[in-house]
Amino acid sequence: MLRLFEQHEIRKIKELNGMWDFVREDNGKAYRLPVPGCWEQHPDMLTYRGQGTYRTKVKVEQDTCLRLEFKGVSHTARVFFDGKQVAEHYNAFTPFAAVISGVQAGEHELVVWVDNSFGEQSALHIPNDYYTYGGITRGVGMEEISPVYIERVHFTPEYADGVWYGKTEVVIRNAGDRKASFRISGALGGTFTGTDCSLLGENALAEMTGEVEPGGETILTGRQSFDGVTPWTPVEPTLYLLKVRLSVDGEVVDDLIERVGIRTVSVQDGRICLNEKPVFMKGFNRHEDHGMCGCAIPLQLMVQDLELMHDMGANAVRTCHYPNDELFLDLCDERGVLVWEENHARGLDLEHMMNPNFDIQCENCIREMIENHYNHPSIVIWGILNECASETEEGRKKYAAQYAQIRRMDQSRPTTSATCRHFTDICLDLPDVVSFNMYSGWYQDVPVKERHEQEMDWIASAGGAGKPVIVSEFGAAAMYGYRDRGRCKWSEERQSDIIRENLEVYRKDPRLSGAFIWQFADCRVTEEGGWFSTRARSHNNKGVVDEYRRPKIAYDTVKEFFENWD
């Protein structure tokens, strides 16, 4: 499954998920592995870091143009179709596609070479406080497209003078060998709320026409008002189907359906506002990691995660520290969960940020994140560069460049980055929202309130005055099942105590716009780079549930506070 709704009525699409042939590059051993999946789930490859090759056969019924879409490959991929390389991609957490023209009817071979190793070529995937798995970890789809096709559609809601508007941007590409004239039509129609999907009165989109050169792309933009729409909110997360069709020479040749929400996000008077009303984000940091399946989490377990967070009273999730599987974002759209999604760069010092591949790999990650996830109404914040070198002049230039890239692509959402450079960060003036990670009671044995007041005073004096403030990480570690009446560190009791003390302070501070517990579930960390020495059993154990989602004592502590948050 690639999405929770059908995206095409005209374009033919086939999911390629299933069992693929796989060969390890280091020893040549052959396996049959599931796609999507992590190769670490096989008993022969529990800690394998290296290269391998996936292989399968695909069949097309007629001569066509194909578009192959990969939702995630960890972390480097080279794609070959009938022996010819058609794509290369870096980053496990963003999707990519390959378009192949002139494909003849019949059977064809699809090969994907995968690498999850560390080295100079990889500026973002490094030994870290989470695990870099290997494999085709998210879904794969094959689409039959016309030479002129819809690449993407972005929908931006706007509200002015009591009227809802929508700006629709359509990108058309031409994989053919001749110039083409085209027409765009569409409608904002079906609604989706909870488990009910029904077609209501449709708002037709204004038609647009254009031309596109061979090998080129054309972008068309329209804006219009919409009557009788219901705004998307966490309480009533109404979704609409935006249907767009492409005609060439009077014939409808392609379509794309996106699911959108009518809502605005803004920063006003030091608050984050949804539909012009202040909103407080109470939630969790969540890694895509599970004890049974690594980062290739199936839909059923994504649903379980959201059910557990909802049971605790959370209304928000931060996708630390990378773009998430789009199925999870679809679920957040449906359930009214507020999402802070961020690019992939975590805990990088200046030396890592000066890697010659850093800038381009970050730029590609941000571009792919926003291009592919733009239409999710649940995403209310774009984040970058968690705990990176924001205390340096060289780092500041990189922060500024990434914020500028986001604002060129999307001005409808605020930006932020989570800092741990307390009292030294020189980048707080750059984002729309100031966010900080603070582990009072765990890494620092200091009173939470005293330390929090020091931090808030410093933020106001260091460029953050008048901006919304979020506590982006706080918490403590505990080993599941380890109980101690003396409440020593690593016990479930001490973790619960520390989280309680933090929540008591943050709940009473009207200057805050959000608080995110680190973290929802325990996650595996890399053994390379020394992380294992401070992470018992090579896991970050700060989850309020363990890696199998078994609740710790802190689960009920969080539930007590989140459910009764004023």
Image (cartoon, grey):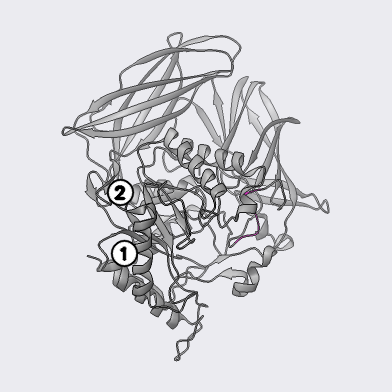
Nearer the camera: disc 1 or disc 2: 1
User: Does the CB distance between marks 1 and 2 fall below 8 Å?
Assistant: no
The circle drawn on residue 194 is: 2
User: Which residues make up the magenta segment?
Assistant: 123-128
The circle drawn on residue 313 is: 1
Question: Percent from the top left, x then y, of residue 248?
Answer: 46, 12
- Residue beneath the point at 59% across and 55% down: 348
Identified by mark 1, the residue type is Gly
Query: In terms of secondary structure, where does tag 2 sit?
Result: loop
Question: Percent from the top left, x then y, of residue 83?
Answer: 76, 31
Task: Please give left or right for residue 260 compared with residue 401 in the image.
Answer: left
Can you name the residue that lies furthest to the bottom here? 485
Task: Please give left or right for residue 504 compared with residue 322 in the image.
Answer: left
- Residue beneath the point at 35% across and 42% down: 377
In the image, is residue 417 part of the stretch drawn in magenta?
A: no
The circle drawn on residue 24 is: none
In the image, is residue 126 part of the stretch drawn in magenta?
A: yes
Query: Foreground: 192 or 156?
Result: 156
Q: Is residue 91 above or below residue 308?
A: above
Question: Percent from the top left, x then y, of residue 17?
Answer: 59, 44
Image quarter hosting the C terminus: bottom left
* Distance (Cα) linking label 1 and label 2: 18 Å
Secondary structure mainly formed by the magenta segment: loop
Query: In terms of secondary structure, where does tag 1 sit?
Result: loop
Q: Is residue 265 above or below residue 449?
A: above
- Residue 250 in view of the camera: yes
Question: Percent from the top left, x then y, of residue 13?
Answer: 53, 32
